[in-house]
Image (tube, coloured by chain):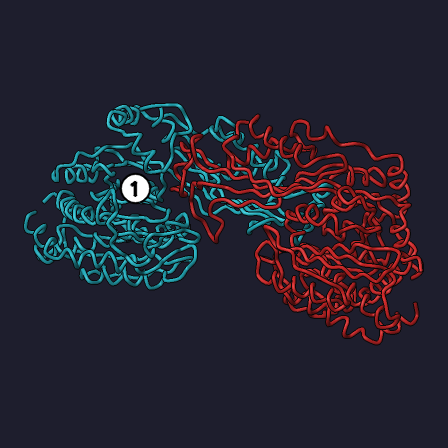
Chain colours: A red, B cyan
Amino acid sequence: MDDIFAHMDARFEDHISRVRSFVSQPSISGEGAGMAEMAELVRDSIQRLGGTAEIVPTPGWPVVFGEVSVGAPRTLLLYGMYDVQPVEGEEWIAPPFAGDIVDLPEFGPSMVARGVYNTKGPLAGLFNVLESIQAVRGRLPVNLKFVVEGEEELSSRNLPGFIEAYKDRLGADATYFPFYSQNRDGKPVLWLGVKGIQYFEIACRGGAWGGPRTRGVHGCNAVWVGNPIWRMTRALATMMDDAEQIQIEGFYDDVVPPSAEDEALLQQLARTFDPANELWMWDTERFKYDLHGADLLRRYLYDPQLNIDGVLGGYTGPGMKTLLPHEVRVKMDVRLVPNMEPERVRQRIRDHLVKIGRDDFEVHFYEGYPAAKTNVSEHVVQSVIRSCRSLGAEPEIWPHVAGSAPLYLFSRVLNQPFATGGLGHGGRPHSPNEYATVEGMRLFERSVARFIYEFAGA
Amino acid sequence: MDDIFAHMDARFEDHISRVRSFVSQPSISGEGAGMAEMAELVRDSIQRLGGTAEIVPTPGWPVVFGEVSVGAPRTLLLYGMYDVQPVEGEEWIAPPFAGDIVDLPEFGPSMVARGVYNTKGPLAGLFNVLESIQAVRGRLPVNLKFVVEGEEELSSRNLPGFIEAYKDRLGADATYFPFYSQNRDGKPVLWLGVKGIQYFEIACRGGAWGGPRTRGVHGCNAVWVGNPIWRMTRALATMMDDAEQIQIEGFYDDVVPPSAEDEALLQQLARTFDPANELWMWDTERFKYDLHGADLLRRYLYDPQLNIDGVLGGYTGPGMKTLLPHEVRVKMDVRLVPNMEPERVRQRIRDHLVKIGRDDFEVHFYEGYPAAKTNVSEHVVQSVIRSCRSLGAEPEIWPHVAGSAPLYLFSRVLNQPFATGGLGHGGRPHSPNEYATVEGMRLFERSVARFIYEFAGA
């Protein structure tokens, strides 16, 4: 691979510029600005490889679909996303959509930008790699298909429709989702699956139960008129107890213990798993549970979660305002572990609200999806492992991770094994000062180049 | 009084303009803009009466103190406020600081503006009356003192200090707080007291208990890292049960039942009290309790309240963002009924948080104050009653109201009886589209002129 690595090193400044051009283009799917321009950037990148690409409309943001056919024996489907999380209300050390390189005390020169880690940095790096292979070797060793969606941060709500509609054109030997997978100590993390997710919003407004109907009123009336925030507070409190066990009836019914193979992976993982690194990454002093090793990991990976993402109601400005509010809104999500289905989760939440006498709450469910798994023995997974090892890094293998991605569409609907990863390091996804190290971007490109040749079997 | 009434009618357009000039000057004490200008407007109005007036600094917004000495036998202390509530996030049918006259379907021509009802409209009207009396009769029939504060909407946090410092100069036979007291049917409401208030904020942030410490992190970590919103939610839920009974230990210990005199007033009040009007005013379909007449009123007036004014935590923007937040903030208030003291209430809240294991919560108490009462037989109260009757309106007498004002400073510290009121109608205090009817402003001026002569005994 020395020829390709040398080529990439010589053009590294240009490669960084491409990452910058990706992150400089805002594309917050929850807000909308720049989404069309970002989709065009991705389409153009595929076309520059000599492939065909189209921006496929959906009821939400479009999917960029592309193909590069080179007559190779194997075909790889590249899954990615071009949208990012909002930055509203966050304080950043660099503008979130500029791509500034900041010398971070702990990591050295790093690009600080929304999406540089999750996941425009890897997406831009992937195109850098593919162009470099073409430049050095004349042609790619595999056929490629691209599915780059614009709603991953919105629970991929229209990706199922796209996959269904384009099913016949999505045939491939495997799916690959590129990602910076090294933690701060350089250890690459390879995960064989993801949790599913069901995001939802609930609102309580004044109505037949009481409470002001259309406007906040003078706060002294709270003594005899109901307050939607109290009503919501007590409703939420019925859902989770002090031991952090979810109290929604049947919520754990579909949860299954790890398979024997996953349990073995857990035991192996517990040997290298670094809880201190996790505490550091998530800026916390302690986990919820006084557990260690495989026991902590089992809880982390095989327990569903019920999270409150945000809550807003009444007067929240400076100083005091006495107000009896007329509404409160709460954003929540469930992370689904293997064997949980979104529809059943939605039904249990609805049933719980009825059971506690809150059928007046407005509930809006976003598109949900289930967990997904692949197998460590798959060729595509082994190709990732070999690419890491060839660069001196032994991957830590996780049965799956706690995060979500709609990989079930590839594993379950398209029936393809999948792999994720690549070298490189970044952090603070969904947080201020999301970053990726510059040196990690170089390692990422090398590992992806290697992976592609491993996968091609060449 | 015909000479004075005729004079006021002839100048009514100018009088309305004065109200407009008061409400057009923003003076949101919680935010700050315009407070100095508004204090000057009030000071100038007192000086135009030939009195002395000064803007007295406090650690917060200043108090306007003034005196008009005419050598009359009786002295009346006029209490008022020049600050108003915020309008942030509210939707108005007219600009909140313009003083537009809008023909409201139910009320006819009305000024729609922040503070026109609570309480710049009555304050401006008071000056209109006093100037009219001087113009027609040459001199006022009573000596006046003015205490017009700029922090009523901030719990009057620096008024106690002012009263203490100026105690020797505040001697008067009674205190009067002018207000539009007629409900939508024209019935004037005369209240003999107010509840006290203790406003406070509590916040939960990640720390030794767990939770992210300084920033929100990726939402998938909620499965193993604590969420401050859940922690706060469960804490709040311990404070109020489903029957809307406050569960803070000892909270009701100091609550006393109505005195025999108050109970008699309650029984009398129940005969004219119009619950439908209250439901309409507070935009609600039902009260919390299935009670009627004196039983409902007793609950309303003699129960303390624990209200959630607002709550904010995590992601509350459009669409979805999966986030494990690092903090949540809640604004709350207690309304104190007679015999409850703010310091004891604060201690019980602190004790409760310790008891439920939440001593990590940040708690900030604003200045609190107790309830205040006056007696129906007082000359100043009887003067208000006679002024209403002389204009054909029989007042409905309330032992006290559910709202708060720091009248204890006058009744308890200065040892003066007090009275409140005046004809006129307005509504939606602390809400969008606060209003007062133009015709009510005319009635207000007549009733205040009459009251002043009744009080003077002339």
The C terminus of chain B sits in image quarter = top left
Q: Quadrant of residue B32?
A: bottom left
Residue A21: horizontal and vertical position, in percent? 69, 69
Q: Please identify the residue farthest to the bottom as the structure is shown.
A: A10
Residue A121: horizontal and vertical position, in percent? 74, 63
Residue B109: horizontal and vertical position, in percent? 21, 49
**What number of labels is visible?**
1
Q: Is residue A286 visible?
A: no
The chain containing the residue under callout 1 comes to B
Residue B339: horizontal and vertical position, in percent? 40, 33
Amino acid type, mark 1: Asn
Q: Identify the residue at horizontal 68%, vertical 48% (top origin).
A: A165
Q: Identify the residue at horizontal 93%, vertical 57% (top origin).
A: A457
Query: Which of B439/A386 is in front?
Result: A386
List the residue tagged with mark 1: B415
User: How crowded is the residue under tag 1: few (<14 C-alpha within 10 Å), some, or many (20+)?
Assistant: some
Q: Can residue A13 be seen in this view?
A: yes
For this view, does A116 lie left or right of residue B286? right
Query: Which of A166/B30 is in front?
Result: A166
Q: Identify the residue at horizontal 30%, vertical 41% (top origin).
A: B415
